[in-house]
Amino acid sequence: MSKCVFVFPRLMALLLMLLQISVSSADEATLSIWQRDITTFRVNIAGVTAQERVDYALSRIESTPPIELHKGPRSVYKTQDDEASVGFYFGDHFIFYLREGDLAPGQTLKEEEEKILTKLTAYAEAQARQREPRRILIGIVAFLVFTVIFFLCMFILAVYRRWIERLFSKEKIVDKKIVILGVDFSSHIAEMIKRGLLTLSWVCLAVLSYIYVVLLLRAFPYTEVWGQKLGRKVIGLIGDLLLGVLRSIPDLFTLMVIYVIIRSLINLVKYTFEGMEGSKRRGRWMDEDTRKATKRVLIILIWVFGVVVAYPYIPGSDSEAFKGISVLLGLMVSLGSTGLVNQIMAGFVVLYSGAMRSGEYVHMGDVEGTLTEVGLLSCKVLTPRGEYVSIPNAVIMNGKTVNYSRLAKKDGAVFATSITIGYDTPWKTVHRLMQDAASNTTQIKDSPKPRIIQEELGDFAVKYTLVFNVDDPQRKPAILTEVHTKIQDGFAREGIQIMSPHFNMQPEDPVLPPRD
């Protein structure tokens, strides 16, 4: 127990000493005067904190007599508490001490001493210039001249903007039409040129304002450091941009070569497929829809290959920002391309299977009409009602498609229509009347001959289906309308009732249309 009482207070004292050392080492303050950072204090001396040392040094610098300030700074080495330090003076006027503990990692006392003497010399010179009436007068004159020039430039830019507004307010600033994909972009291009010229004026104003501020700050010794810092930033930025451009010249040349190669390959693909379109034997190898889709796919693949090859040569491609954008774009494409890839793969199946082509009369799902376009993502159908329907390829793949035109050139397209007739009517009579209706319809072919199929013996009536061939499947609505009128007229003349819709019981009188 006595040992604990003896050891515990000493451990606490040691812990407090370590904590005080860590706090003292973390406590630092920078000595600055007239916008010039002289040095940084990082240790306490005899209980005086780094900030108190800065305040003391500032008071000593500000109280320096002009005659001592005129002598310039000097340094004196000294050892305090077994630690090397440097004392700084203006002439014989003491300013502050810098100890080894104030140095940052990697710094030496000699290097820091030279930096501090250079900064104190610049401060002393600025103080001397600030006291000269001639220097103050030059600063005021420079301020007035720079201000007049700046406002004159602002006036010129304002006149320039008004001139641009009046110039582009005319109706025909762009006389020639610029048509791209059937759209006239002349007005849009004129507006873009106008906004670009106006933006250029604002950029010029921003640059002039920056230069004006830099020149004003450098006109007076007190703010000269600020002006130098702003000027160095601009010069450094311009230098970095020029250096970056110079370093990017080989990569830009490589990109240009890759672009020329990609454009040559694309032109070769276009030339090849245009030659196939003009060839008389073009339909034997690849039809029009397949050619268009194949050309697009090849061009896209060439561009993708070109982007992949050119990516490492794009200026800034190795930067973290560029990498982040690439990852973001890749994630967006990955998340949003599932349905798109499904549609494209279905489009490949539809295109290269040859199940249907543009201009054919088809029935897909609940849509029937003339197929006007077969694309990678969807097919376009023009219905007899004048409706333009777009059907996704994935829907086509999952449903049934009927092509009426594929065999039309050989025997004609096959159509059918059905009626139901009661059992009290002889089937031969029904066959005769339906054959007469087909033979009296002008658009129905005589060969192959129209035929009758008895599809169903229902509960109340027999279902008869007339199957016939036509040369032009796109006239299906008109042909069906004509053959239906012939069937109605023929059965009405014979006094035979058509059992559609169904009846639950035979009516006492036949349900017939009135005679004309």
Image: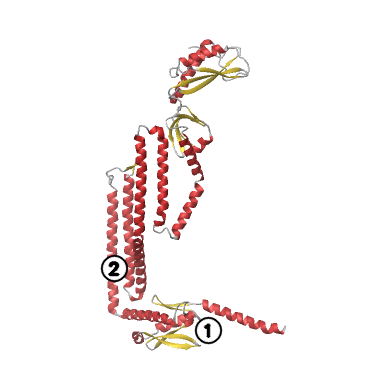
Q: Residue at x 28, y 50 (%)?
A: 166
Residue 4 in which image quadrant: bottom right
User: Which comes sooner in the sequence, label 2 or label 1?
Assistant: 1
Alpha carbon separation for disc pair 2 and 1: 51 Å
Classify mark 1: helix, strand or loop: loop
Nearer to us in this view, 512 or 19:
19
Q: Please name which of the two marks, 2 or 1, marks the residue nearer to the observer.
A: 1
State the image coordinates of residue 456 (x, y, percent, origin top left).
59, 20
Q: Which residue is mark 2?
A: 146
User: Front-most of 420 and 504?
Assistant: 420
Q: Determine if residue 156 is in view.
A: yes
Residue 295: % across, % down: 40, 41
Q: Amino acid at mark 1?
A: Gly
Q: Crowdedness of circle 2 by 10 Å Cα count: few (<14), some, many (20+)?
A: some
Q: Is residue 178 left or right of residue 43?
A: left
Residue neighbourhood size for the residue with mark 1, other residues' Cα within 10 Å, grouped as few (<14), some (14–19), many (≥20): few
On the image, the x and y values in percent for residue 71 come to: 34, 86
> Which residue in the rendered view is the most extreme toward the top?
494
Quadrant of the image containing the N terminus: bottom right
Secondary structure under the numbered disc 2 in the rendered image:
helix
Residue 149: quarter of image? bottom left
List the residue tagged with mark 1. Answer: 47
Q: Position of residue 243 (x, y in %)?
A: 35, 64
Q: Is residue 309 above or below residue 469?
A: below
Given the image, on which type of amino acid does mark 2 rest? Phe
